[in-house]
Amino acid sequence: MSTDLYGVRVLDVAADASRVRFRVFLVYYDTDSRTHPPLPDDPGFFLQELWGAMRFEPITALHPLRMVGLEQLLDEDWLATNAHRYVRRVDRVATRNFPVADGDWERLRDATGPAPGTAGR
């Protein structure tokens, strides 16, 4: 799973506890200004990812996620009001490579720039 800014991997599913463990990582850095988007910690982001995962693993039984439509997921007000009904809490348990060290910016690339070491090819 991924978005324009983040890559998302499911690391573990504990269905009996209704818990999913994700790894979320940045795929976009603005290397010119040496900034990047913050890591998400809002339930709406994770509700969107869970909903999107249904295309890979369709839910055949009656499930609360089937009650959510695309229009609702794209409505920021609806997400802010209702995401907590589907995602009870978000706990960040580890952070890697944050903040980005000064020497590491040179090996990163943004979405529009060439890969490091390939300029002029």
Image (tube, rainbow, N blue to C red):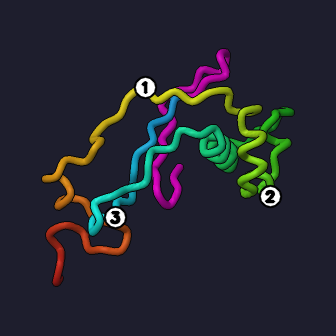
Disc 3: which residue? 30
Residue at 40% over, 45% down: 25
The answer to which of marks 2 and 3 sits earlier in the sequence is 3
Q: How crowded is mark 2: few (under 14 residues within 10 Å), some or many (20 or more)?
A: few
State which region is magenta.
1-20
In the displayed structure, 118 sits above or below 87; it is below
Q: Residue type at mark 3?
A: Asp
What is the secondary structure assignment of the residue under circle 3? Answer: loop
**Is 76 within the magenta?**
no
**Is 16 within the magenta?**
yes
Q: In which quarter of the image is residue 24?
A: top left
Circle 2/circle 3 CB separation < 8 Å: no
Checking the image for residue 71, the label placed there is 2
Q: Percent from the top left, x then y, of residue 14?
A: 60, 20
Checking the image for residue 93, the label placed there is 1
What is the secondary structure assignment of the residue under circle 1? Answer: loop
Checking the image for residue 49, the label placed there is none
Q: Distance between the residues labelled 1 and 3?
A: 25 Å
Q: Residue type at mark 2?
A: Glu
Depth check, front residue: 104 or 117: 104
What is the secondary structure assignment of the residue under circle 2? Answer: helix
Q: Residue type at mark 1?
A: Val
Residue 111 located left or right of residue 13: left
Q: Percent from the top left, x then y, of residue 105?
A: 21, 57
Q: Distance between the residues labelled 1 and 2?
A: 31 Å
